[in-house]
Image: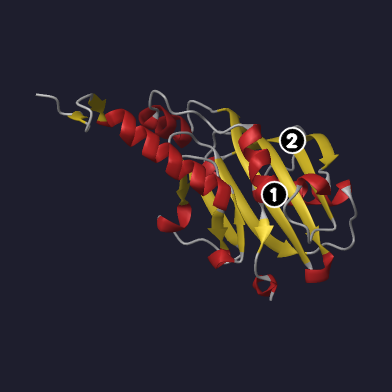
Amino acid sequence: MRLFSSVNKNGYFVDNRVVFVYILEQLRMQDVRLGRPLFGGALSATIPYSAKDISELREIPDNQEVFAHCHTDQSIIVELLEFQNHVQNEDAARYHFEDVAGSNKALAPGTSEVRTVVALPKSQLSLEECSSAWLLTGTQLVAKFNEEAKNTVTFYLGLFRLPQFSTDILVTFNDPLSISLDSSSAVAVGADQQVGTEPWTLNNFQCLLQSLRLHDPGVFG
């Protein structure tokens, strides 16, 4: 008895598992092309595969969209923030990185470091409304849920500046570099790790940044 196969009109066996995987891949590719609605459809972007919408699990601030990888400790946050007109160019990216470090209690010497800050060419972006865009790479020592154990996390921070809307759009990719054995993340990742589940990469994040689009400026108030 063939549980996963059937016979097509030409009399050949068809592996339904292959067909099922093909359909899933086509749906995934369609989602990549169309982009995932954000903030009620006011924006959209290509969110990496295996993303879990955290708003389905707990309450998220109205100015945030939060996604977590289903089988790793990686996460992506899209935030609508007040435009910081006292900082310009790459200093604006550094300002937001330090603000995140403050929230993570990573302001002490040796707990955070900016590695690179580069401009993102507007010709490669879908968000035509931004005046400039920046990609910062850095690391922070972060304790999860106010635990004592600290994890070393690589932060990829994309910043889109929209002064005409008094808004900075901040997109953060949290990618753990090393997880303390005493962290709750070590237990969660170890228990949920599955064969064949790939972690998100910088390429996935860059695809998100390049695909971000604005559909309704009313989201900025």
* Residue at image coords 60%, 31%: 201
- Residue type at the position of mark 2: Gly
Give the vertical position of 102 relative to 188 (above or below): below
Q: Nearer the viewer, residue 70 or 38?
A: 38
**Is residue 145 in sight in this rendering?**
no
Q: What secondary structure is marked by label 1?
A: helix
* Residue neighbourhood size for the residue with mark 2, other residues' Cα within 10 Å, grouped as few (<14), some (14–19), many (≥20): some
* Residue neighbourhood size for the residue with mark 1, other residues' Cα within 10 Å, grouped as few (<14), some (14–19), many (≥20): some
The quadrant in which the C terminus is found is bottom right
Dot 1 or dot 2: first in sequence order is 1
Q: Nearer the viewer, residue 43 or 65?
A: 43
Whether residue 17 sits left or right of residue 134 in the image: it is left
Numbered circle sitting on residue 100: 1
Most extreme residue toward the front, as rendered?
10
1 and 2 marks in contact (CB < 8 Å) = no
* Residue at image coords 74%, 52%: 99
Whether residue 78 sits left or right of residue 54 in the image: it is right
Q: Position of residue 175 (x, y in %)?
A: 60, 34
Residue 129's image quarter?
bottom right
Q: What secondary structure is marked by label 2?
A: strand
The quadrant in which the N terminus is found is top left
- Residue type at the position of mark 1: Val
Give the vertical position of 191 relative to 57 (above or below): above
Q: Position of residue 94 (x, y in %)?
A: 82, 46
Q: Which residue is mark 2?
A: 138
Dot in front, 1 or 2: 2
